[in-house]
Image (tube, rainbow, N blue to C red):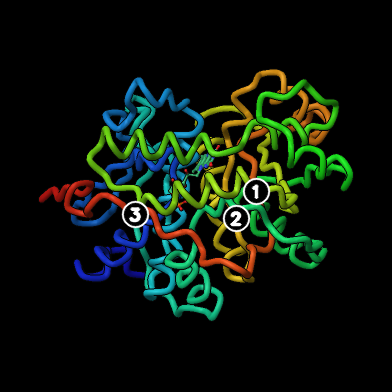
Amino acid sequence: MDRALPDDEIVETALALALRAPSRHNIQPWRWLIDQGSVHLYLDRARVLPATEVVERDLLLSCGAALHHLSVAFAALGWATIVRRMPNPDDPDYLAAVTTVAHRPTNQDIAMSASISQRRSDRRNYRSWIIPPGYLGLLTERAAALGALIRPVRARAADRLSVATQSAAGAPCGDPAIGIRRCSGIEEATACRTQAFFLGDNLPEAAVAASARADATTEPDHADLLLLGTSADDRLASLRAGEAMSAVLLTATNVGLATCPLSAPLESTELHHRLRRDILDDTAHPQVILRVGRAPSSADPPPMTPRRLLADVLALVNT
Ligand SMILES: Cc1cc2nc3c(=O)[nH]c(=O)nc-3n(C[C@H](O)[C@H](O)[C@H](O)COP(=O)(O)O)c2cc1C
């Protein structure tokens, strides 16, 4: 079997789709390098500014999402990927080496790839709608295929109602779902705008305004909260969790669900421990929370956030 990379146009198309991966504060902490036989993914620490204080786990989750987006894009273009994660123990920021092998795209490959251009973080309050067990099973399956587990974080309906009207700084509450809702809010949107300012990116004002509206509304939020966890708690586990997160987000998008990753709540050590104990039975480590649900039908979806140019994140090496 031929393991060389496809032609430049296909590689660049796949990389352009990988740029659409979600990242904490939209910092896009990745760098790609291409040599004759492989695409290499590096963590770009220069993207992390002190003002954002993004933790290592979020960087690796974001890079894992980009890595999975790349594989999804390649698959739809007729190339299956072979991924070596953390290939050089002496270079911790060298996250993956990707080679490809020709393959026949399936309908699922094409649907997942199409979802890359549809997905966006939707921070509005979601409509009342119970996530069908079939969907939850599908999302669980897709995460499991990449070595992660997902568990719903349940909150009683009455608690949800009261939480929706409380401030993020409310008193501690026994239900982890309520803690998560208090910690989420619009901070990320504001931070994204700050980060965009620092980095010269241009986060659409409308994205921030939509988040602000969501926070101000009195409509209760009916989002389901899914906790994504891994059995290990190291850098490799976070990278793989990012891949699983991407699979869940793209699958959810494909079946018409709105989504938003949330890691701000996990910055609370207390909530992190509570989620690990109450939701993961102390047997796995929380990586990220995923808000999933039905977007409101009355308004346009939030606009897509901008990305860096491929030329700014890609280097070619002739060997
Ligand atoms: C690991 C990770 C953690 C995130 N945490 C939050 C969060 O706590 N709150 C939030 O509103 N958005 C969060 N996001 C969403 C990012 O802000 C979003 O992906 C980024 O701004 C790009 O926008 P897009 O997802 O619409 O493409 C997170 C994304 C990732 C990948």
Is mark 2 in CB contact (under 8 Å) with mark 3? Answer: no
Distance of label 2 from label 1 (alpha carbons): 18 Å
> Which quarter of the picture shows residue 77?
bottom left
Where residue 223 sits in the image (x, y, percent)?
71, 52
- Seen at 17% across and 52% down, the residue is 311
Residue 24: where, in percent of width, then height?
Answer: 45, 38
Mark nearest the camera among 3 and 1 is 1
Q: Hey, what amino acid is under mark 1? A: Thr
Residue 217 image label: 1
Q: In the displayed structure, does residue 146 sit left or right of residue 133?
A: left
Report if the beta carbon of the residue with label 2 is closer than 8 angstroms to ligand 1: no
Q: Is tag 2's residue or tag 1's residue first in the polypeptide sequence?
A: 1
Which of label 2 and label 3 is nearer to you? 2
Queried on whether the Cβ of the residue with tag 3 lies below 8 angstroms from ligand 1, the answer reads no
Query: Mark 2: few, some, or many residues within 10 Å (few <14, many ≥20)?
Result: many
Cα distance, mark 3 to mark 1?
A: 32 Å
Crowd rating for badge 3 (residues with CA inside 10 Å; few <14, some 14–19, many 20+):
many
Tell me whether circle 3 and circle 1 mark residues in contact (CB < 8 Å).
no
- How far apart marks 2 and 3 lie (CA) works out to 18 Å
The type of residue carrying mark 3 is Leu
Q: Quick one: label 1, few (<14), some, or many (20+) residues within 10 Å?
A: few
Q: Which residue is mark 3?
A: 19
Q: Residue furthest left?
A: 318
Residue visible at 46% across and 69% down in the picture: 113
Which residue is labeled 2 in the image?
259
